[in-house]
Image (cartoon, rainbow, N blue to C red):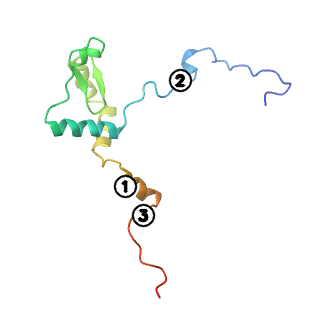
Amino acid sequence: MGPPGGGKKKGGPKAKIKKYKRMCWTKNRARDTDQIQDEIEKASDTGKPIAFDYDDELPGGGQFYCIESAKHFTDAKALADHKKTRFYKKRCKEIKAEKYDQNSAEWASGMRKEVLPPAHQK
């Protein structure tokens, strides 16, 4: 249905301003905590820190990388400043939490694996 009278609905006063237009939420989406936890586990299993070869397309040539937030930075100062932020500290706390897996999902939904005793015994 449209507005009364059958005409087209006009845009609001901010309809032509780019920052008010609808954006796709997946464009700059951060990596999920379980993906980062997997990455940290792989690094600890191999014993090598995560390192990148020099790449001109990445900020700072890919040499300044924060594992916890999965971001590249231009220099060491930017990385050090990032590690003082609220976002970084909050992300570290999320990563330290127990990893979410299928068993906990089934437990939360009420699917139980344990065998319960019968309700009515003969």
Residue 46: image tag: none
Q: Amino acid at mark 2?
A: Met
Q: Quadrant of the N terminus?
A: top right
- The Cα–Cα distance between marks 2 and 3, rounded to whole angstroms, is 41 Å
Query: Can you say whether 56 is above or below 100 in the image?
Result: above
- 90 vs 62, left or right, is right
Q: Position of residue 114 (x, y in %)?
A: 38, 68
Residue 112: image tag: 3
Marks 1,2: beta carbons within 8 A: no
Residue 103: image tag: 1
Q: Which one is closest to the eye, mark 2 or mark 3?
A: 3
Nearest to N terminus: mark 2 or mark 3 = 2
- Residue that carries the numbered disc 2 in the rendered image: 23
Query: Can you say whether 46 is above or below 15 in the image?
Result: below
Q: Residue furthest bottom?
A: 122
SS at mark 3 in the image = loop
Query: Can you say whether 59 is above or below 110 in the image?
Result: above
SS at mark 2 in the image = loop
Q: Amino acid at mark 1?
A: Asn
Q: Residues within 10 Å of mark 3 (few under 14, many from 20)?
A: few
Q: Residue furthest left?
A: 47
